[in-house]
């Protein structure tokens, strides 16, 4: 079984269901990728910062699925905003491939490339050491350059609000293909999704089932919809996003869960009704609104419902 495809603004297509690899341990992720590809997944979501791309590449090769049949995404880390191609080349080497299908700016937060840590440079006061003299629009120029060189097939952003995108778009010669965001039943970001779709930018959902021990899986509305259709709650949570033409990236290293996410999400996409969608759309605004991912970057990213303090003590 494979997922349906969603058309990108560059004419290429992206599988609507992908395997997320964030927080997957190196000794587990190779097997998870191999299993996912053998079960029908054709989309793997990676990142330089996850620290497991070498193992992802091993899983890809072990699956026996041709590289050309798999859509691979990775992401530029903050300490490389001035060195886009260098970060990309490290990712390509680790994955064992000569191109990516999609390359994203992981966070719109340039970090000091000469700081005291290669991933999370810190200032003496304990805040993140941001590269405040670098502008995100210049990072995007670097993204456009690697696209023009043929090292990636599409480029996009991640964790970008409308405010952040408006810092990129006025000088962009290539429109971002996607914006990967924390999207789920409790953080649907309806206004941002409408904005993205008005620009022809495909939304992607990381953490579509919430975080570890997520309350989403016990949500009364979602479980009620699931019971009505003979589905699991996780199926409804994924299908809800798919119905909105949002790419979903559930993460698992469990073989049964990996397969169930693909099959169940597809079934839910087919079964959810207009009434179901309206009920699910109202859950967050009825008092359940919640973000799980809010790193202390120390700047305003322009998101609604971002409650982490800008300057943590």
Image: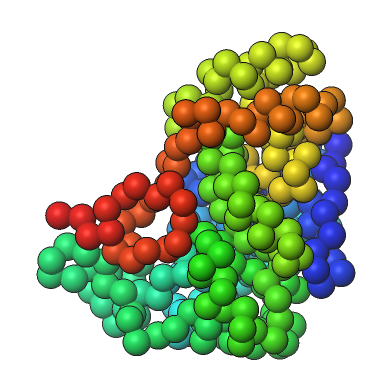
Q: Residue 156 appears in which quarter of the rendering?
A: bottom right
Chosen colour scheme = rainbow
Q: Position of residue 178 (x, y in %)?
A: 68, 63
Could you say which is closer to the camera, residue 142 or residue 192?
Answer: 192
Residue 131 locus on image (x, y percent) = 33, 80
Identify which residue, 78 or 57, lies in the foreground. Answer: 78
Is residue 72 in view from this perspective?
no
Residue 177 position in % (x across, y down): 71, 68
Relative to 219, 287 lies left or right? left
- Quadrant in which residue 105 is drawn: bottom right
Relative height, residue 139 to residue 25 (above, below): below
- Can you see residue 110? yes
Above or below, 291 relative to 64: above
Number of callouts: 0
Q: Nearer the viewer, residue 166 or 19?
A: 166
The residue shown at (47%, 69%) is: 108
Query: Which image quadrant: the N terminus?
Result: top right
Q: Is residue 131 above or below residue 296?
A: below
Residue 104 image point, x, y percent: 59, 68
| In this picture, residue 67 sits left or right of residue 251 | right
Which sits in the foreground, 63 or 230? Answer: 230
Looking at the image, residue 310 sits to the left or right of residue 270; the answer is left
């Amino acid at each position: 079984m494979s997922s349906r495809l969603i058309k990108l603004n560059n004419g290429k297509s992206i599988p609507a269901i992908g395997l997320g690899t964030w927080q997957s341990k190196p000794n587990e992720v190779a097997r998870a990728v191999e299993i996912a590809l053998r079960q029908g997944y054709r989309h793997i979501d990676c990142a330089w910062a996850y620290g497991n791309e070498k193992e992802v590449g091993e899983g890809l090769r072990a699956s026996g699925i041709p590289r050309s049949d798999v859509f691979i995404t990775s992401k530029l880390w903050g300490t490389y905003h001035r060195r886009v191609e260098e970060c990309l080349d490290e990712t390509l080497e680790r994955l064992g491939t000569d191109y990516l299908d999609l390359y994203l700016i992981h966070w719109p937060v340039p970090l000091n490339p000469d700081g005291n840590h290669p991933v999370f440079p810190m200032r003496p006061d304990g805040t993140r050491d941001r590269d405040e003299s670098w502008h995100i629009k210049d990072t995007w120029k670097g993204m456009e350059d690697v696209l023009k060189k043929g090292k990636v097939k599409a480029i996009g952003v991640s964790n970008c609000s409308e405010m952040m995108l408006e810092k990129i778009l006025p000088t962009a010669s290539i429109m971002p293909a996607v914006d990967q965001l924390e999207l789920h039943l409790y953080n649907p970001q309806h206004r941002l999704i409408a904005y993205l779709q008005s620009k022809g930018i495909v939304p992607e959902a990381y953490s579509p089932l919430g975080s570890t021990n997520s309350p989403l899986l016990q949500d009364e509305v979602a479980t009620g919809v699931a019971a009505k259709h003979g589905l699991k709650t996780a199926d409804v949570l994924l299908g809800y996003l798919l119905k909105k033409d949002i790419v979903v990236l559930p993460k698992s290293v469990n073989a049964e869960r990996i397969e169930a996410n693909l099959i169940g999400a597809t079934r839910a996409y087919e079964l959810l009704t207009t009434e179901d969608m309206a009920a699910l759309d109202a859950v967050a605004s009825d008092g359940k609104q919640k973000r799980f991912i809010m790193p202390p970057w120390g700047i305003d990213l322009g998101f609604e419902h971002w409650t982490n303090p800008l300057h943590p003590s």
